[in-house]
Image (cartoon, helix red, strand yellow):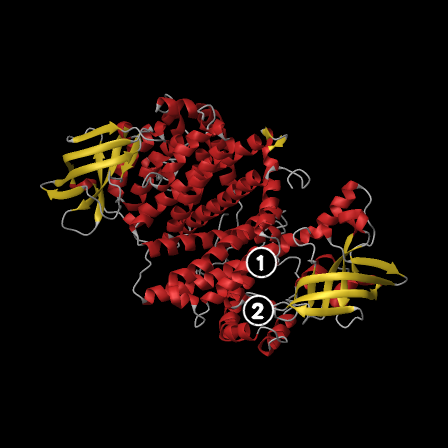
Amino acid sequence: MINLELPKKLQMAQQMSHQVAATVFRPIARKYDKIEHCDTPEELIPLGQMIKGMGGDGKKPESQSGGRASDAVNNGANMMQVLTTAEMSWGCIGLMLSIPGLGLGNAAIQAVGTPQQKERFGGLHCAMAITEPGCGSDSAAVKTSAVLDGDEWVLNGEKIFATSASRGDAVVVWATLDKSKGKAAIKSFVVERGTPGMEIVRCEDKMGLRVSDTAAIVFTDCRIPKDNILGSAEIADTAEARKKAFGGVMQTFDNTRPPVAAMAYGVARAALEITKELLQKEGIEFRYEKSIYNSTAIQAEVYRMEAELEAARLLILKAAWMADNKQPNSKQASMCKAKAGRVGNQITLKCVELCGSLGYGEELLLEKFARDSKILDIFEGTQQIQQLIIARNVLGKSSSELK
Amino acid sequence: MSDQSAASFDLTLTEEQRITRESIRRFVESHIKPNARAADEAAAAPADFYRQASELGLGLMPIPEALGGAGMARAPISNVLNAEDLGQGDMALAIGALTPLSFINAVLDFASPVQQETYLTPLAMESLVATIALMEPKATFEPTALQTSAVKVDGGYQLNGVKTLVPLATQSRFILVLAALDGEAASAGFVVESAAEGMTIQEESCMGLRPLELCRVELHDVVVPESARINLDMGRLLDLSSIGLAAVAVGCCQAVLDYVVPYVNDRTAFGEPISHRQSVAFMVADMATELEAMRLLVYRAASRAEQGLAFHENAYWCRTFCSEKAMEIGTNGIQLLGGHGFIREHPVEMWYRNLRAAALLQGAVVI
């Protein structure tokens, strides 16, 4: 039965996350935006422990349908994740990304790790390192190499833009076993902090998301145990198998795109709420009475932004709902990321504009939200990469046809 | 968002909705799609179309059994699914097919039991057409500030004013005329019968929706009995119609997308299909994304209406968002066909003209 309201269970999770965002994140958001480079903010330590205690460290329960028939509609872990992510992003995305134990690497280990690997690394805060100075969206072009030497892999190369890598306990690193074999030879490896040969060379100074650390890492003959590889060490040799191998790696993005879309939604909603409050204080009412052209320009702008925001929210929920119900959602995951990424950025920027000096000044968080939101249309697949994926899907094209 | 509900978020159709969807889609394939272009050129629905459409039983469904209907509950979600499917065939014929249902829904929502019996019994028995007259010929038209007036006179009300874009008015047995009540802040609906003295109906020619036979209805001292007055909640009526029209537009936009995809894959330029170019492919990606968003906004608003939750803001967002995106998809539909899209041999120019109405037509499809 078509119903786009949320069940109580999800609303309660949403309220709890909102509480954290309002009471823990918001009061310290500006402070840490100023501090920028620091260890994990102390205010977040108990939060990380609490989430770990609840089993929320990237582990996804298989089903949360709670005893209902197996064909029952599932509102499970994926929906839970986008909703809680959105609420925490309403507080501060940088702080959310700094919570120990919620790294992207954790998600990768949970997605493709063996039971033993999940056991070994599950309790760690794991970052993810894919991007290199010479490759971004084209993640198949990584140059960092991994060579098996006895019982160890030897890694060499340079990674950049690794979120949480300097604070984390470990990093999941993408490296190639054989550059000449293309995508199929790309594997991921868990490198624990302190491993000789792994050096954090710097943390980037960024426009936004400042409290979240973004590290550059250099690997020089960095030796890690043989079973720190995630997935198989075999290099697929048929075209079909190659496609499947890399496709499997890329599929983890189907699950991480909706949460990033949820970040864009959350920060945009935060900006819009503050904007509406400010405008209401100045006597502007929002009652959706007249048609948009008979409203004032400022009312019309707010109504349009609300509609766009709601559109993004529903696309996110649909993508997550499909994942929860085991429906392939690659297209919908990219749609929600594309839509939320672009409107999230547009809305936060427009809110600064609408509020004028109040929006531009640092007294309120509007200018920070506008700085933070830009990256959400870039990382985890840029707007243009999402468009490519959607277009290939709708047009029935391969990546060699539609480049 | 704070409404407490135990039900899961779900986008699955019920078994009944799936069955209805199949029969509607069969009707669209057999009666709407093949006739859409000819109907547009003729500015008239195919002969017998509205009788055939009435056999789908859409209007009959919500009419109480005692009045000759099927006695089903009011079902905004089912209505938007039907509107979407019909709209995928042709917007004008879709709105036309739904026009009697719009009148019926308004009567069910707002009229007294006696009025329901008076107006719905003949509709259930004879598959007659009935329509709603809301819009007025004014650029800044606002449904909450109607110029058409109803003045209390001996034995009833006297109506004066001009209504425009009234679907199927010439063939309607009843017209629900919305008018401002003299001396009161509210407005009300008045059921005017086709033969009423002082009412003149004239077909209007418009940019699109030509087979819908949109009419201008002029009321000069038309007197209706007191019993013809329906006290309606204008906000609810407008919201339901915003959702309904958006649903029809969703269907039409789906038709646009379904048409351009094979075209851009087949059409070659510079030695390869034009869909291999990002500038083309990204337009298609955005069309598909915005269409999906339109659909979800429509579903959410309709499902809130069906569940008895407040849906005014949802309907407003629906209208705001769908008006804009529908036209964007309509104009890009032509753009992707280039000059060929401008030629009437292809349907995209017709869809472009029809989709323009998505932003301005009000009160036409009450779900």
Question: Which chain is mark 2 on?
Answer: A
Marks 1 and 2, Cα distance to the nearest angstrom?
Answer: 17 Å
| Helix, strand or loop status at disc 1 | helix
Q: Quadrant of residue A302?
A: bottom left
Residue of label 2: A210
Judge whether A392 appears above or below A99 on screen.
above
A283 left or right of A214? left
Q: Residue furthest right?
A: A150
Residue A260 numbered tag: 1
Q: Secondary structure at mark 2?
A: loop
Residue B195 x/y as whole percent: 19, 28
Which quarter of the figure has residue A298?
bottom left
A248 vs B283: above or below: below
Residue B56: percent from the left, percent from the top? 42, 31
Q: Nearer the viewer, residue A152 or B17?
A: A152
Q: Chain of mark 1?
A: A
What amino acid is labelled 1 in the image?
A: Val
Total number of numbered labels? 2
At x 30%, y 54%, the residue is A296
Looking at the rendered structure, the kind of residue marked 2 is Arg
Q: In the image, residue A209 lies at what x, y percent? A: 56, 66
Tell us which disc is closer to us: 1 or 2: 2
Q: Residues within 10 Å of mark 2 (few under 14, many from 20)?
A: many
Residue sitting nearer the eye, B189 or A134: A134
Residue at (65% x, 68% y) in the render: A164
